[in-house]
Image: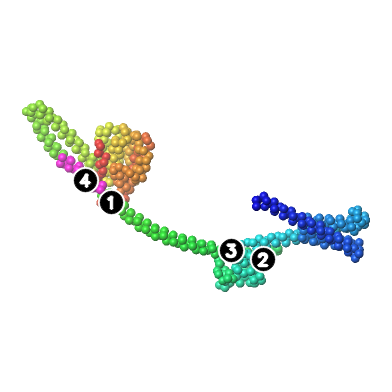
Amino acid sequence: MTPDKYDFSKVANRSSYEMTRYAVAVLAAGAALYSRYLLTPVLGVNNPYHTVWLAVVFCSWYCGLGPSIVSSLLCASGVDYLFLVPYHSFRIQDRSQLFGILGFLVFSGAIIALGESNRRGAASQSLLAAVVNSSDDAIISKNLKGIITSWNQGAERLFGWTSQETIGQPITIIIPPELRDEETTILKRISAGERIDHLETTRRKKTGDTVAVSLTISPVRDREGRIVGASKIARDITERKLVEARLKAVHDELEERVREGTAEFQQKNEELTKQSQVVRDLSARLLQSQDAERRKIARELHDSVGQLLAAISMNISKVAREKEKLSPQAEKCVEENQTLVEQIQSEIRTLSHLLHPPLLEEIGLESAIRWFIDGFTQRSRIDVSLEISPSRLGRLTDDLEIAIFRIVQESLTNIHRHSGSRIARIQLAQDDGHVRCKISDDGVGIPLEKQLQLNSYGAMGVGIRGMRERIRQLGGTLQIESNGNGTTVSVTLPVNPTQASIPPTAKCSRNAGSVTGIRNI
């Protein structure tokens, strides 16, 4: 059936019902008039309204407002036409006839109004009863003595008792014995006008099984506002309780698994932390070993190779003093050898100083950096400026001075290798318990992907790794920034680093450090 046909059918049914009511009203009016006609020999003609009152009362009670009005008008017209002089005429002879008809219509209107009011009240009660009866929830009423006064079909389905079995019985018949003591308390709270919401308890059906019920109990008042009883709305939540129980079991199981997983994760994390600490200790020891080896090489270059070169230089000088005894070719070779030895001595001295900068021990970081800048500028043709704040940098700890020197060394080396810049700037500052070093250039910069790797401990070269490891041991930070117009390396180190952060075996001497920065210079 289509929606249009369905709606039309409903309209047709409603119209048929309306026509039936009007037809019954007309028939009632006709029957009343005919009855009065038959009773005329007995009742006479003085009061012709005896039977038509019955038609008005009947129509006002059963047929509704419209049919009742139609019935009243038909009765008034029929009485005027059939029983008032002149007969068979609608003409009114005198005032008494007019007042009689008007009185009949007025009283008929009062009867119709009263009947309509009662009919609507009965219809409302019938509709309310139908709504209550059709509810899936159990709706129960009781008086203040705990006697059941109403019981809907939902209550029959929930508790298994019929209305005939429960109405007039105490409410305790559906309450388990262990819970009946609560009923007295509930009645007291209801008598005090209190509403009891979501009282969850257990009720047993007549069959004996147990159900979980959620209750809402409200006081019932009469027209004067007095509390005369209580209404209960009960909902079966047995399935919900079972679902909640299953969910709780699953939740508890998941929590147990999470606890086990957390404990395992913590154990793995502790193991990883220990392994990480071992790796850091090994890294620190490796740096220490490298520094010690560089110091040894520097010492060997200065003491052994340097002494040998000095001896060779003295021998060449003796030969040079007697060069007139040599051939021109031999004389030229002696002069060239003397020059080459001097160059080798200079290179050995520079290399030895870079491996083990003695100025750090003698006069401090500032002088060592200035000495390195001078040599770097001569070899790389890169103009390097140094700015120190305050005007002179005080002496720092051995670890800080060697770390800052190696950072400057590595950064300038990278500028020479990769940036293409012809200038470099170094800024050193000491304030608020920290020493800050910033090295920048105006070169081609570093690609963004490479920057992310450098700042997130991703893939990086040996030099950067060495810088990060030294800074980490000293509790500092390293940041590398580049915008395509140059690169800036920023280092911040605490002036008094926590000694516990540096493994005892990894503390570097004043002369220790990576020499990655001199490989291509």
CA separation, marks 2 and 4?
100 Å
| Three-letter code, disc 1 | Asp
Q: Point out the stretch of residues depicted in magenta.
A: 286-305
Q: Is residue 220 left or right of residue 484?
A: right
Residue drawn at x 64%, y 70% as measured from the top left = 166
Relative to the observer, which residue lies in front, 179 or 312? 179
State whether residue 324 is above or below residue 105. Answer: above
| Three-letter code, disc 4 | Glu
Relative to the observer, which residue lies in front, 22 or 518? 22
Q: Quadrant of residue 163?
A: bottom right
Residue drawn at x 93%, y 56% as measured from the top left = 86
State whether residue 46 is above or below residue 341. Answer: below
Precedes in sequence: disc 2 or disc 4 = 2
Q: Quadrant of residue 327?
A: top left
Secondary structure of the residue carrying tag 1 is helix
State whether residue 399 is above or below residue 21. Answer: above
Q: Position of residue 220 (x, y in %)?
A: 66, 64
Residue highlighted by disc 4 = 293
Residue highlighted by disc 2 = 227
Relative to the observer, which residue lies in front, 418 or 107? 107
CA separation, marks 1 and 3?
68 Å
| Three-letter code, disc 3 | Arg
